[in-house]
Image (cartoon, rainbow, N blue to C red):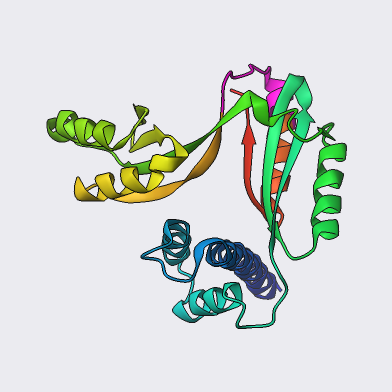
Amino acid sequence: MSGHSKWSTIKHKKGMADAKRSANFTRLAREIEVAVRAKGPDPEMNFQLRLAIDRARAGNMPKDNIERAITRGSGVDDGSQVAELLYEAYAPGGTALIIECLTDNRNRTGNEVKLILSKGGATFANSGSVTYLFDQKGVVRTDLISLDKRDEVELNLIEAGADEIDYTEDQTIINCPITELSNINDAAVLSELKVNSAQMEWLPKINVSLDDSLAEQLGGIIEKLEDLDDVTNVYTNAE
């Protein structure tokens, strides 16, 4: 009986992993479709598409899936049209949320997001009432710049348009105007840095402090939102 139970647990865990991988592939495919519709199917001429393809490859998305997503985005395949949605919300402790989605069904996505917000003590906000609390920036994350090369690489990045360069224990975070995102990405590559991500993000102008209880409540909301297939990014101004 214990052997059967163990095998059932293994199958259950594998099923959960497969479902998460499938959901991630769906998100990645939608990003590719939207990028193609915006600026065409050539990644050499479409930086947004190049980033989306890079993210798909990093997520181990099969080549055939990537090519099908490009085909759908080009309008060659008669599939459902994917829409970009942005929701703004007021969250516990006076914090704010920006929720970015890619979906083929606006009503489904809106209802799913609303349910999570209401159960967690958050509410939808009017358009523009939250985004003004954030700046939309280009953000490039790379492996940590070695100390012996840091001055030279920082100078190259600043000349390419970087506004701010920060360091964590294991990575470099470069902020820049959205218009300079491609330049910063290319400068990082030329400086022989491994680019882990390059995308547009909403960065809070001022962070809001929360006590442990409210932080846990907000964390639960964000975790549930990020588990939705249609949600691509969630941003908050909580510290």
Q: Position of residue 130 (x, y in %)?
A: 71, 29
Identify the residue at the far left of this view.
148
Q: Position of residue 70 (x, y in %)?
A: 53, 74
Q: Is residue 32 left or right of residue 85?
A: left
Task: Give me the residue at 84% from left, 59% from top.
Answer: 108
The N terminus appears in which quarter of the rendering?
bottom right
Q: Position of residue 57 (x, y in %)?
A: 42, 66
Task: Give me the residue at 58% from left, 22% from top.
Answer: 239
Camera-nearest residue between 222 and 185:
185
Task: Check the image and report above or below for 7 versus 16.
Answer: below
Q: Is residue 171 left or right of residue 96?
A: left
Task: Give me the residue at 50% from left, 74% from top.
Answer: 66
Task: Check the image and report above or below for 161 versus 65.
Answer: above
**Is 214 inside the magenta-drawn segment?**
yes
**Magenta residue span:** 204-217
Camera-nearest residue between 83 and 100:
83
Camera-nearest residue between 83 and 223:
83
- Quadrant location of residue 87? top right
